[in-house]
Image (tube, helix red, strand yellow):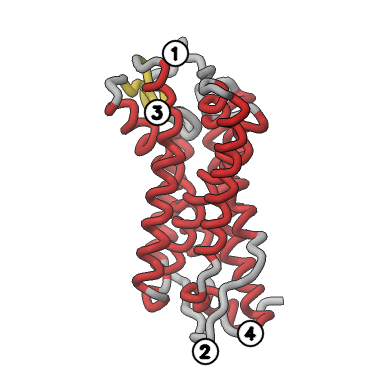
Amino acid sequence: MLGPTTRADVHLPTVLAIGVVCFAAVTVLHEAGGHGLACLVVGGEALAVSSTELRCDGPEDGARLVVTAAGSIANIVVGLAAMAAGIALGPARGVWSYVLWLFGATNLFHAGMYMLIGPLTGFGDWSSVARNLEPTLVWTIGITVLGYGVNVVGSRLARRPVWQPLAGIQDEEREARMRLLTRLPLAAALVVSLAAGLLSPLQPRYALVTSLIAPLVLLLLVRLPSWPERDPPAPPVRIASWAWVVAGVVVGLSFVLVLGPGLGSFADYSIAR
């Protein structure tokens, strides 16, 4: 049950909106900031981008693997930076503390889960990296272990005592608030990701599977093994902002209606790498 303090201090539309903005930002960072920038650096041509794929023509062999790996690497670098900024600023920033926490954790879990499951399932960027390097088994194990390590680091950073004011003081209040602060972003991310995937110009099965898997990294947030605690505990911060609600609506619609169908041309493009 949600107590009066929890209901008053956690504005549900704000949390949903921040979930949309953070997920969209993580996705754009992965596709355009990671794959796209690496494509240009190795001399390729970025011809199209969607919510699930970046088309990079030109690079081959090792250069193509650099492009493939760059998406998750960008997520890791930015995720660590966001966590560091949130820890340095402390809880006094209120809504911004929550934004940095959620954005940092989502980046790290997004990269960590793709590295963890990709080589073992044959799906995604890291499956391509592993099978194109020799010895394949060694690379598969190494990438999987590294992905597990990234998830562990993300979990530990997300549970640092500095984040306790996001969660609350009493055990029941803390658990209730954390359920809101993790499950609502997961729901919001699933909705916008699947809606964008339905409009994708790529193979429907690939687009929808990718659109489903990408938000599920937030299950690691929902199932954090313990809530942030500190001694002595600090009062919970209020998480409410209509400016973020507006931003969430604008970003969500743009993500679905613009990035879903994609920018540029995917004509005659194969997702096989």
Tag count in the figure?
4
Whole-angstrom CA distance, mark 2 to mark 4, is: 12 Å
The percent position of residue 110, horizontal first and vertical second, equals 53, 46
What residue is disc 4 on? 170
User: Which is more toward the observer, 211 or 68?
Assistant: 68
Mark 3 vs mark 4: give the one in front.
3
Amino acid tagged 1: Ala
Amino acid at the residue labelled 3: Val
Q: Which quarter of the rendered picture does the N terminus lie within?
A: bottom right
Q: Are marks 3 and 4 in contact (CB under 8 Å)?
A: no
Of labels 1 and 3, earlier in sequence is 3
Of pointers 4 and 1, the one earlier in the residue sequence: 4
Residue at label 1? 267
Tags 3 and 2 touching, CB below 8 Å:
no
- Label 2 element class: loop
Instruction: Measuring from the top left, give residue 224's x and y in whole percent.
Output: 63, 62
- Asked if residue 132 is positioned above or below residue 210 in the image, the reply reads above
Mark 2 touches mark 4? (CB < 8 Å) = no
Q: Which residue carries the number 2 mark? A: 232
Please report contact status of discs 1 and 3: CB closer than 8 Å, yes or no.
Answer: no
User: Against 6, is 55 above or below?
Assistant: above
Which of the pair 71/102 is nearer the observer? 71
Q: Are marks 1 and 2 in contact (CB under 8 Å)?
A: no
